[in-house]
Image (cartoon, helix red, strand yellow):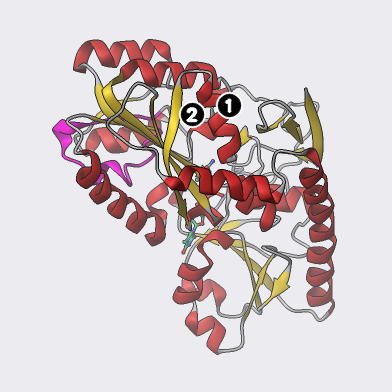
Amino acid sequence: MIKKFLDLGLQPLANNYLINQKKLSIKNNELYKLEVFFDLKTKLVSISKKIPKNKMFNNKYPYKSSMSMTMTKSFKKLHKDIIKDFDPKLFLEIGSNDGALIKNFKKNKAICVEPCNNLAKITSKLGYKTYPNYWDRNLAKKIKKKYGNVDVVYAANTITHIADLENVFKSIFNVLSQNGILIIEDPSLLECLKKTSYDQFYNEHIYVFSAIAVKNILDKFNFELFDIQNLQTHGGSLRYFIKNKKNKLYKIKKTVTKQINKELKFGMNKINVYKKFSNSVLKSKFKLLKILKKIKNKNKTIVGYGATAKSTTVLNYCKIDNNFIDYFVDTTPDKSNKFMPGKNIKIYKYNQKLLNNVDYIFLGAWNFKKEIINKEKKFKKRGGKFISHVPKPHVF
Ligand code: DWN
């Protein structure tokens, strides 16, 4: 039985940056109800409306993982760790994006799967065998037939985007070698609850996982967690290490029960904690609007920094438009000169000069706060201030 605990209103597709200013409508299937549910049995948290995948992940997908130094560094370290701990003869990445991780691997030892053709082309050009497909049973069979079993399958910020978890896990496990392992990393639901970062919910994020839910899902397929790492990336993520129960090569580390106990202590196996979160989300909305209104009443300028998918949720849920934020700046080429979905705020290609006369920066990419503050020391030095809605709306 699933219970609704959060209603984020009508939302456009989070990564559908618009070429022209446009009023989106439900009638034209451009706005979708965004409601979040808790499964009382599996403890899985998911959104209600599942949008056809080709509407979200196609040859125009704008997001590129290598746009931040933080992610580039994190992937470099991960590559080193994978080689040291598992030394795979064959490595497969599902959702390889623009190759931020895979480019650290040797070309003859790594395979990419990336359904967004514009991104698949990038790794293909770099010389990596790339399948421009959605991950499913057929593709798994095809890869296994051509290359044999895979030793390490890795997926970062990908599994949360795939509706059919049974299909996804079964097909991964079919392709793995006897002692092969699966590593997935995704935003941590515990961190999301603690930080009231409700913007982790948007149409692409079908699930936000807890370790409790991941364990329950894996149990169904005879797989188990043997290690969990807490990461700082994306506002707090978990990296799950998964193996077949028959695989005795790896001992189950204490990190697994430690994380699960942390989540149980927080009450994440019960609906009450989610209802509390929902109240905090509402409070967060009012507080953010109060801050923005106060600033605008003083005729100060606010600019958004990082035109994130997460910002789409915040802008549309809180009804923040051009009356508050003049424009966004973002380093991603495919986002520039477009408009934020649903709220029509223009996005400009990042250039420090665009911050020259700005009083306040709203951190759309709050998850890269450290990296951004480091980059914008000049702005801060001349009295510029930042606004973030995480963990609570505040100015600093
Ligand atoms: O799961 C997903 C995550 C991993 O990435 C996807 N469904 C979509 C996307 O979500 P997001 O847009 O919320 O992700 P980020 O990584 O928070 O996006 C950061 C944005 O900020 C990028 O567009 C790049 C931009 N940026 C910038 O302009 N200057 C980032 C940094 C660090 C900067 O200095």
- Direction bottom: furthest residue: 382
x then y, percent, for residue 154: 36, 35
In this rendering, the answer to whether 178 lies above or below 36 is above
Residue at 76% across / 65% down in the picture? 324
User: On the rendered image, what quadrant is the N terminus found in?
Assistant: top right
- Would residue 11 be visible to someone looking at this image? yes
Q: How far apart are marks 1 and 2 (CA)?
A: 7 Å
x then y, percent, for residue 176: 30, 21
Give the magenta range. 95-114
Q: In which quarter of the image is residue 283?
A: bottom right
User: On the rendered image, what quadrant is the C terminus found in?
Assistant: bottom right
Identity, as a three-letter code, of the amino acid under mark 1: Lys
Of the pair 7 and 24, the residue shown nearer to us? 7
x then y, percent, for residue 265: 67, 50
Whether the magenta-drawn stretch holds residue 106 is answered as: yes
Q: Give left or right: position of 220 versus 95.
A: right
Residue at 54% across / 72% down in the picture? 354
Asked whether mark 1 and ligand 1 are closer than 8 Å, the reply comes as no
SS of the residue under disc 1: helix
Q: Give left or right: position of 392 versus 331.
A: right
Image mark for residue 58 = 2
Of the pair 78 and 333, the residue shown nearer to us? 78
SS of the residue under disc 2: loop
Q: In which quarter of the image is residue 302?
A: bottom right
Residue at 75% across / 37% down in the picture? 24
The number of numbered discs placed on residues in the rendered structure image is 2
Identity, as a three-letter code, of the amino acid under mark 2: Asn
x then y, percent, for residue 348: 54, 59
Q: Are marks 1 and 2 in contact (CB under 8 Å)?
A: yes
Q: In which quarter of the image is residue 245?
A: top left
Name the residue tied to disc 1: 55
